[in-house]
Amino acid sequence: MTMIAPSLLAADFSRIGEEARRAFEAGADWLHLDIMDGHFVDNISFGPEICAAVRKAVGPDRFLDAHLMIERPDHYFGRFVKAGVNLICFHVELGDEYYIRNTLKRIRRAGVKNGLAVNPATPFETLLPFLGEIDLLLVMSVVPGFGGQSFMPSVLDKVVKAAEWRADHQASFLIQMDGGIGKNNADQCALAGADVLVAGSSTFKAADMAQAIAEMK
Ligand SMILES: O=C(CO)[C@@H](O)[C@H](O)COP(=O)(O)O
C-alpha cells in the first residue's frame, strides 16, 4: 500500500514534539522533515537540532526522512545522521556527476538510506546516472521552498518513467512525491508509480488528520 509521510513544515512549530507524535498516532508511515537553508530555496525552516528533538519525541522506531533543500549536503548530512534521521535526500540539481555520486555513497556509508530529489523543471534524463545507486527518488510536484502550493500534474510523467526504469533494471528504490498532495490527487500519484506521498497542508491542517491520511490511502 502507498505510504503517507506528513511534512512537519505544516505543523504548529510551538508544539513540534507533540505534532510529530500526532502524525504517527494518526497513521503516518513516515514523518518528512523539510530542511531549507535560504540559499538553495527561498526559505529557512529548521536544522539538525530540531530533528534530534523530533527523534526524541517520537522514540527510536519511527521512520524520519530528511529532505535537504540546502546547498552543501556533503558538508551537513553527518549532523542529520547524528540527529537520528533514517533517510537523507538531497537535490540532483546541486552538482556534477562526481559530487552527486560521492555524496550518495557517503550517506549510505554513514549508515542511513540515501535519496535524490528532482525539481519539476529538471528532466528525467538528469537522474539516469544515479538511479542504480539510490534508496529513494523524490519527485517534487511543486517548486521547493514553501508548503501550501498547487500540485503540478506535469511531473507525473517523470514518475511513470522512473517506475518503468526501476522495473526494467530490477531496481528497488522507492519513489516519493511531494507538494500539493491530498485526497484529490493521491490516486493519480500512486497510479503513476509513487510509493510514498508527502503531504503537509492536507494532513497537519486537516480537521481530522487520521481521516485525511486514511482517505489518501
Ligand atoms: O518540500 C516541500 C516544499 O518545499 C514540501 O514538503 C511541502 O512542505 C509540502 O507541503 P504541502 O504542499 O503538502 O502543503
Image: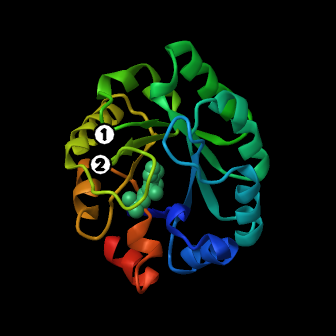
Q: Which residue is mark 2?
A: 193
Question: Along the horizontal axis of the image, is 151 left or right of 93?
Answer: left
The part of the image, by quadrant, that contains residue 50 is: bottom right
Name the kind of residue labelled 2 in the image: Gly
Q: Is residue 60 among the parts visible in the rendering?
A: no
Q: Nearer the viewer, residue 17 or 101?
A: 17
Residue 154: x %, y % from top left: 20, 43
Q: Earlier in the sequence, mark 1 or mark 2?
A: 1
Rounded to the nearest whole Å, what is the CA distance between mark 1 and mark 2?
6 Å
Image colouring:
rainbow
Question: Along the horizontal axis of the image, is 42 left or right of 33?
Answer: left
Asked if the residue under mark 2 is in contact with the one under mark 1, i.e. CB atoms within 8 Å, the reply is: yes
Quadrant of ligand 1: it is bottom left
Residue 107: x %, y % from top left: 67, 33
The kind of secondary structure element at disc 1 is helix
Instruction: Identify the residue at horizontal 71%, vertical 29% (top origin).
Output: 75
Residue 103: x %, y % from top left: 63, 25
Instruction: Identify the residue at horizontal 32%, vertical 67% (top origin).
Output: 182
Question: Along the horizontal axis of the image, is 190 left or right of 74?
Answer: left
Above or below, 99 relative to 30: above
